[in-house]
Image (spheres, coloured by chain):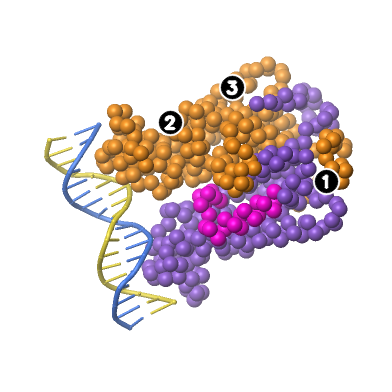
Chain colours: A purple, B orange, C blue, D yellow
Amino acid sequence: MTKIESGIATRQRLLEAAQELFALNGFDRVAVRDVTEKAGANVAAVNYHFGSREGLVEKVIERYITPINEERLARLDELERRVPGKMVPLEDVIEAFVRPFLTQVRRSELSEKLCLRLIGRLMGDHYGQMPKSLELQFQLVSQRFKRAFERVLPGVAEDDLVWRGHFMAGSMVHAMANGEMLHRLTGGVSGAPSMELTLSRFVKFAAAGMRQWVPQAPIEMDVSDLEDSEKNPEIPQSEFLF
Amino acid sequence: MTKIESGIATRQRLLEAAQELFALNGFDRVAVRDVTEKAGANVAAVNYHFGSREGLVEKVIERYITPINEERLARLDELERRVPGKMVPLEDVIEAFVRPFLTQVRRSELSEKLCLRLIGRLMGDHYGQMPKSLELQFQLVSQRFKRAFERVLPGVAEDDLVWRGHFMAGSMVHAMANGEMLHRLTGGVSGAPSMELTLSRFVKFAAAGMRQWVPQAPIEMDVSDLEDSEKNPEIPQSEFLF
DNA sequence: GTCTATAAAGTGATAGAC
DNA sequence: GTCTATCACTTTATAGAC
């Protein structure tokens, strides 16, 4: 629990101290006193600068989420400007949605691990109770991306699309917040988590889930390196109903 | 904030009151006094019956998670007994992983909505800090499912498989915890959330993500109901690198 | 098992001096 | 802007009577 160097404006130090503590312990388990102490500021500082504890929480959230959402929209704009007739690859839309998280991680004062955890907590604890200022932002983002997905995945029913997007967002949040935990739980099989590799994996997973290609004919698989017994697995032709 | 009918053993009433409050407000925002009051018990009851507040939290978590994990393993056993030579459909393995949540929802004293939120919170808040008694359980479950997925998806590298499983679990947790929120955010497009339908949607999404079929040749799509302009979208042949 | 009373520490917030 | 002092509660936990 290191103190944060003095000299920077108090307000800034408070924000930095707060975000680190929130990342470590969760938004609810951090007292105003913990923050001010870590920031080397006075107990009253939080109330002076942010009006209340809640005000501080909101500012921390805004500071993290707003640039992410802005970059998302900017990337989407750019995609839509690209060669008007041509269809944009689904993967690019998904990347426009996720990569801003990585940008934020790099921009953040926090370590990669902590920053990811903070974002995960943000989305987890506060998904249903975002600050007013962010609700509109999120509505805009999800509207824009919904339309983008509709264009890139023509023929998918609207409700299906919305749910697929929901699943996609969920796997992203969870993967970010618990990536290191995966490492532990699997005894290291998942490999040292590099963000860029994880992003790549995520995009592939999400793209497959979003488009849900079903092979019309027996699939061509590369079976060259499989055991004989595995060469002709009975691939489920998914008589999948519910 | 209704009281829970007296007459049932205090311990039981405390558990029921606690789980409802935890679902509503999150594990951290509920005081022991809130629980005892709702349960119509004495303030000291929690400490008498569970040793401490933390003891109560652990019991609530165990009560929800253990039967889910047991059913998961039982379903997997059953799948593996089925026609030994034949390969089990991926969808069935995924369902063995998720359906126990629905079973739990039906068994629970809580409303569907609250129960899903509680489970979502469990996985969110406590994924990294499960009670000791559950850590082993989770390790066993994830090992068993890892092996099942390996068998059903031959040819997928181990680390890829682990990550895909991780993404899958994440989208499930998130979808459960925030399904109603999706409804709000999309202005109702997602349709009234029926658990069975959501499960079906989830299984399809997850299965596609887990197997990641890539078409080797131009895909046959049903374009009969598309506009002319949409008939020949340039389907991305995913030169997808990162 | 249940209760009261109370301890002991922690909580967010603020008035008012500097 | 910053600080001290302090208020007004709330928190978990427990000792000891019933």
Residue A148 image point, x, y percent: 74, 50
Pointer 2 chain:
B
Q: Is residue A93 left or right of residue C2?
A: right
Q: Which numbered disc, 2 or 1, marks the residue closer to the eye?
A: 2
Instruction: From the viewer's side, name the closer residue of D10 and D17.
Output: D10
**Residue at left offset 58%, top offset 23%:** B75
Instruction: Decide which of tag 2 and tag 3 comes sooner along the chain.
Output: 3
Identified at 44% across, 53% down, the residue is A28
Name the mark nearer the viewer: 2 or 3: 2
Mark 1 belongs to which amino acid?
Pro
Q: Residue A166 placed where, x, y %?
A: 63, 44
Front disc: 1 or 3? 1
Q: Quadrant of residue B55?
A: top left
Q: Which residue is mark 2?
A: B109
| Horizontal side, residue B135 vs residue B97: left or right | left
For disc 1, the neighbor class at 10 Å (few under 14, some 14 to 19, many from 20) is some
Residue A90 rendering spot, x and y as whole percentages:
76, 47
**Is residue A212 inside the magenta stretch?**
no
In the image, which residues are magenta?
A123-146
Of B242 and D12, which appears nearest the observer? D12
Q: CA distance from mark 1 to mark 3?
A: 40 Å
Q: Amino acid at mark 3?
A: Asp
User: Is residue B201 something one can see in this rendering?
Assistant: yes
- The correct choice, above or below, for A72 with respect to B137 in the image is below
The subunit carrying tag 3 is B
Disc number placed over residue B77 in the picture, else none:
3
> Which residue is the site of mark 1?
B236
How crowded pointer 3 is (Cα within 10 Å; few <14, some 14-19, many 20+) is rated as: few
